[in-house]
Image: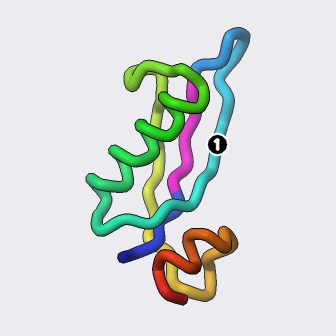
Amino acid sequence: MKAFRVVGSFADTRKRQPFSVEVSAENEEAVREKVLSIFGSKHRLKRWEIDITEIAELSPDQITNQTVKYEVGA
């Protein structure tokens, strides 16, 4: 597993809401699917309402989320 930081925004009722989240997955396609699934579930958003602008792979010392750190084995 690898760790990734995903940056983007989603459509809120009044404006675009920016986000930055760390997730663990095998590749960038899996990361994209996971983020769309999480935000769709938590915020009741459609996939077209979520814009992902950047997906960056993280080294073990850059990970701040403890759950992701555990899943990666860092």
Query: Is 16 displayed left or right of 23 in the figure?
Result: right
**Image location of residue 16, percent across then percent down:** 65, 23
Query: Is 4 displayed left or right of 48 in the figure?
Result: right
**Image location of residue 12, percent across then percent down:** 65, 18
- Quarter of the image that includes the C terminus: bottom right
Residue at x-position 56% and y-position 61%? 22
Q: Quadrant of residue 17?
A: top right
Front-most of 73 and 49? 73
Residue hosting label 1: 19
- Quarter of the image that includes the N terminus: bottom left
The majority secondary structure of the magenta stretch comes to strand
Disc 1 secondary structure class = strand
Residue at x-position 50% and y-position 61%? 23
Q: Amino acid at mark 1?
A: Phe
Q: Is residue 52 magenta?
A: no
Q: Magenta residues, as a range? A: 6-10
Q: How many marks?
A: 1
Residue at x-position 45% and y-position 66%? 24
Q: Is residue 20 above or below residue 13?
A: below
Q: Given the current orientation, which residue lies at the most extreme right position?
A: 14
**Image location of residue 43, percent across then percent down:** 60, 26
Front-most of 74 and 18? 74
Residue at x-position 55% and y-position 49%? 7
**Image location of residue 33, percent across then percent down:** 34, 44
Label 1 Cα crowd, 10 Å radius (few <14 / some 14-19 / many 20+): few
Q: Is residue 65 above or below residue 54?
A: below
Colour scheme employed for the rendering of this structure: rainbow
